[in-house]
Image: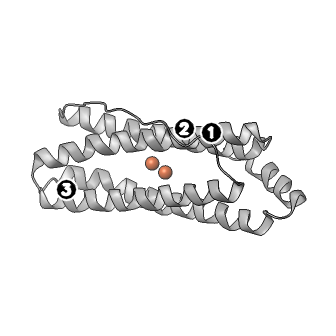
Amino acid sequence: MSEVDLKSDFNRQLNQELRNAYLYLSMAAFFESITLPGFAHYFSVQAREELEHAMKFYRFMVDRGWSIELQEIPKPKTTWSSVLEAAEDFLSAEVENTKRIWRMVDSARQAGDKAAESFLQWFVNEQVEEEKNASELLARVKLVKDHPAGLLALDRLLAERK
Ligand SMILES: [Fe+2]
Ligand SMILES: [Fe+2]
């Protein structure tokens, strides 16, 4: 893994964080459309966090003097057959993202880039939190999915996310 490959990995991950922001914003809009405003709020906060992640990559690359080439962001999924399906998509997107981050740590190590490795460590830790949040949400959705009163109670809880 050369420094050139590492730079393109960073460009790709900047795009990936934006894709995730897009996916979660699309989920937020979906939840608005089915009148679950707490879920919608939860995913709009999640989308904002992904934008912040993208900006961390952006800032690191600028600080290193690496060139940034923004790529296309494909249209995300816009509808889900159930709340459960959306929660499952959330968890799989985060599991996938963890794999990407871990692969990048290996790349940074192979390139001998200590700064990149140290930078990525924040994301390694962040992904533990992200997977925990997504697993927890999925577990809660499984608990209440067949009980409208439970689903509405969960919706009110999710509305409190900061
Ligand atoms: Fe992220
Ligand atoms: Fe995430």
| Residue for badge 2 | 48
Q: In the displayed structure, does residue 74 sit left or right of residue 85?
A: left
Expressed as whole percent of the image width and height from the top left, the position of residue 24 reads 57, 43
Dot 3 amino acid type? Ala
Q: Residue at x 68, y 40 (%)?
A: 30
Q: Secondary structure at mark 3?
A: helix
Expressed as whole percent of the image width and height from the top left, the position of residue 159 reads 75, 45
| Residue for badge 1 | 44
User: Most extreme residue toward the left, as rendered?
Assistant: 2
Q: In the displayed structure, does residue 55 sit left or right of residue 79?
A: left
Expressed as whole percent of the image width and height from the top left, the position of residue 123 reads 39, 54
Dot 2 amino acid type? Arg
Classed neighbour count for the residue bearing mark 1: other residues with Cα under 10 Å, few (<14), some (14–19), many (≥20) = many
| Residue for badge 3 | 108
Expressed as whole percent of the image width and height from the top left, the position of residue 155 reads 79, 50
| Residue in the foreground of this view, choosing between 86 and 121 | 86
